[in-house]
Image (spheres, helix red, strand yellow):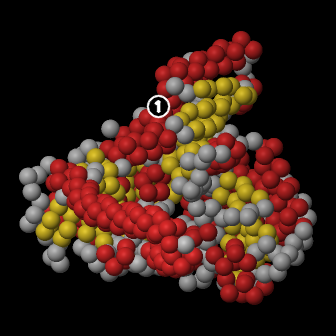
């Protein structure tokens, strides 16, 4: 440090000035002695003062630097010990060797030396295994810390972010949320009422919704006769979720007391700072709720995540002939604008999927367009196989049944693909066909789920219908009459209705009987239907074995399981669930068994008290309130049963 300061540049000008002064003094002595003497005295005094001042400045600076260095070292020690940052030094075995007082105070301990990090908090297992550049959140008591782990130095830093977290939580809790409330069947009921009754009903519904808004701090504005706009924040939404949107039950119960049957559907958009995006999310959620049958709440976040609440009632039939005619005409235009029509159902097709596919193929024929039904001939259950045996007798019809590979080679840009009895891309016979097609139509009677076929040109989803075969039958009625349904085609459609309604006992509306009546006039053979749906003795025995090992809970939930080594048909599993539901004391039934495709299948049935649709959706499936199913890629029936019980317990805890 000393040599550095002695090399300061001020010394060089002083040395040069001294040399010049000596030369000047010598010159003045030769010129005039007394002037030279006076100059010499003054110069020596001035030069001595300058050198003394430079030396003093240097010594003062050196002393200041030494003092500053000491102070900085002391400040560093003070900072290490007193700054509100926790610091912990560990060894290779993650045992604490040193911790500053702040870190000791954080863990409310006298000393941390000698403690193992994982004993202080289980979260240290994750922190120590993580990347050194990652920050981890750690909660200690009521405080939250950002933890930075330096693996090379074995140092851990703790930064208190409790206040920051509180501000973030306040921000998120105060973010805007938009909701659209729709009275499901208002128009249908209002049409049959006089002005006074309609006004009274409006008053009841409006007061109920306004009261709900005031109680929860929600701004509610009626924007149409059957529609309300709700503005709230995230904190209020969380409270509504906690209460499971009690407004659904309030509307249903209140209007029920006045001999009306109104239900409410709510679409909620959240998770975005853009009001435009929130509005789009809310409308998208409402569309999804209506596709699932109404009387529910769908909450859609900007990241695409969805939550559903409600859905406790069976959908009330509210389709109109007008909608069926409009859809039929739109489908006719699409068919006529195509060079070929390909119809495809779901994997392991049942009678409803095959019957509906045959019906759509017939619609193509009615419009003079070639139509083909895509099937996997290796994935047919017994009843469908018997139908295929009958179809083989009709050469013209059988020649239009093709496999997926053939369909892929035939599809062009003008081809139309119609998906029936499912709306999930993962459930179709071959997803490549949907991806390749330019024009896709979906016809389904299941409640809409989160997974959906994108870029469809026409969607006809009616969860109020008993079956897809019923929907297709109605569409056929409005197609050109160039060609009538044959006996076999009518029988296939009727068989699809019979299977999905359990011989007209479940989910059967007036329109179901109208469709069946139409098919009967076209030559549908009810005796052939019964013959197609007959089962052999071996199947009956297999079903009895499944029922034999049933487990019945105190709540009335029956769970039957198959053997891991066997493969059961999907129809057999479904029939077993149906039979269990007829047993005394059973309110819901679940049958778990390996399927032909290697997956573990679960068929679920309910009398309405248990929403089996929600149960199956949690496991990746779907369906209706009283009839649903799923397929699991797990190694055993035991694992599938444990997953089912876990979901049932979670949903039961939610309701409590």
Horizontal side of 153 relative to 473 (left or right) equals left
Q: Position of residue 382 (x, y in %)?
A: 52, 75
Q: Is residue 554 above or below residue 413?
A: above
Residue 45: image quadrant is bottom left
Q: Is residue 176 above or below residue 23?
A: above
Q: Position of residue 300 (x, y in %)?
A: 57, 49
Residue 545: image quadrant is bottom left
Q: Residue at x 68, y 25 (%)?
A: 222
Horizontal side of 493 relative to 582 (left or right) equals right
Q: Is residue 284 above or below residue 370?
A: above
The quarter of the picture where the N terminus appears is bottom left
Secondary-structure class at tag 1: loop
Which residue occupies the foreground of this view, 651 or 121?
121
Q: Position of residue 443 (x, y in %)?
A: 70, 59
Q: Residue at x 27, y 52 (%)?
A: 83
Horizontal side of 445 relative to 42 (left or right) equals right
Which residue occupies the foreground of this view, 289 or 11?
11
Q: Position of residue 379 (x, y in %)?
A: 54, 79
Q: Residue at x 42, y 54 (%)?
A: 615
Examine the rendering and report whether any part of residue 470 can be seen: yes
Q: Residue at x 84, y 70 (%)?
A: 365
Picture mark count:
1
Which residue position holds label 1? 246
Density class for disc 1 (Cα within 10 Å; few <14, some 14-19, many ≥20) is some
The quarter of the picture where the C terminus appears is top left
Furthest-top residue in view? 196
Furthest-front residue in view? 33
Examine the rendering and report whether any part of residue 80 can be seen: no
């Amino acid at each position: 440090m000393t040599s550095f300061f002695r090399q300061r540049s001020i010394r060089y000008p002083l040395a040069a000035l001294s040399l010049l002064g000596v030369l000047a003094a010598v010159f003045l002595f030769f010129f005039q002695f007394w002037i030279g003497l006076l100059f010499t005295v003054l110069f020596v005094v001035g030069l001595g003062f300058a050198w003394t001042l430079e030396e003093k400045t240097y010594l003062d600076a050196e002393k200041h630097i030494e003092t500053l260095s000491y102070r900085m070292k002391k400040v560093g020690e003070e900072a290490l010990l007193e700054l509100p940052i926790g610091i912990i030094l560990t060894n290779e075995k993650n045992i604490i060797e040193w911790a500053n007082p702040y870190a000791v105070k954080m863990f409310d301990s006298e000393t941390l030396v000698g403690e193992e990090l994982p004993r202080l908090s289980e979260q240290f297992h994750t922190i120590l295994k993580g990347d050194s550049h990652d920050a981890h959140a750690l909660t200690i008591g009521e405080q939250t810390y950002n933890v930075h782990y330096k693996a090379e130095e074995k140092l851990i830093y703790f930064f208190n972010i409790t206040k920051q977290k509180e501000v973030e939580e306040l921000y998120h809790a105060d973010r805007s949320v938009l909701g659209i409330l729709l009275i499901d069947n208002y128009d249908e009921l209002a049409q049959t009422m006089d002005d006074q009754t309609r006004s009274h009903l409006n008053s009841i519904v409006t007061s109920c919704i306004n009261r709900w808004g005031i109680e929860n701090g929600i701004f509610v504005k009626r924007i149409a006769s059957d529609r309300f706009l709700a503005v709230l924040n995230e904190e209020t939404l969380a409270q509504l979720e906690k209460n499971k949107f009690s407004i659904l039950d309030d509307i249903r119960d209140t209007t029920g007391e006045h001999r009306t049957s109104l239900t409410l559907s709510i679409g909620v958009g959240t998770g975005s700072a853009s009001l435009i995006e929130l509005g789009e999310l809310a409308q998208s959620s409402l569309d999804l709720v209506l596709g699932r049958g109404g009387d529910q709440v769908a909450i859609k976040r900007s990241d695409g995540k969805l939550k559903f609440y409600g859905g406790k009632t069976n959908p009330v039939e509210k389709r109109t002939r007008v909608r069926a005619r409009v859809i039929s005409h739109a489908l006719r235009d699409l068919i006529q604008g195509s060079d070929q029509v390909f119809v495809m159902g779901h994997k392991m097709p049942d009678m409803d999927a095959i019957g509906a596919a045959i019906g759509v193929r017939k619609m193509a024929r009615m419009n003079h367009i070639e139509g083909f039904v895509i099937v996997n001939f290796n994935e047919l259950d017994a009843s469908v196989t018997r139908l295929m045996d009958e179809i083989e007798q009709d050469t013209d019809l059988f020649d239009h049944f093709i496999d997926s590979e053939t369909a892929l080679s035939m599809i062009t840009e003008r081809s139309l693909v119609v998906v029936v009895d499912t709306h999930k891309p993962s459930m179709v016979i071959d997803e490549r066909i949907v991806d390749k097609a330019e024009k896709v139509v979906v016809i389904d009677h299941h409640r809409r789920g989160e997974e959906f076929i994108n870029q469809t040109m026409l969607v006809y989803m009616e969860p109020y219908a008993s079956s897809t075969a019923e929907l297709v039958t109605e569409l056929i009625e409005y197609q050109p009459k160039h060609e009538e349904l044959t006996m076999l085609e009518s029988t296939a459609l009727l068989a699809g209705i019979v299977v999905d309604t359990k011989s007209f006992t479940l989910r059967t509306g007036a329109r179901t009987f109208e469709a069946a009546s139409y098919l009967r006039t076209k030559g549908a053979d009810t005796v052939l239907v019964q013959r197609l749906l007959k089962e052999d003795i071996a199947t009956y025995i297999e079903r009895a074995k499944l029922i034999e090992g049933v487990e019945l809970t105190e709540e009335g939930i029956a769970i039957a399981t198959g053997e891991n080594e066997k493969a059961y048909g999907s129809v057999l599993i479904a029939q077993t669930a149906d039979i269990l539901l007829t047993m005394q004391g059973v309110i819901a039934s679940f049958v778990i068994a390996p399927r032909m495709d290697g997956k573990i299948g679960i068929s679920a049935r309910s009398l309405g008290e248990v929403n089996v649709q929600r149960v199956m959706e949690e496991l990746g499936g779907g369906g209706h309130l009283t009839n649903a199913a799923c397929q699991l890629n797990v190694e055993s029936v035991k694992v599938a049963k444990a997953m089912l019980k876990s979901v049932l317990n979670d949903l039961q805890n939610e309701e409590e």
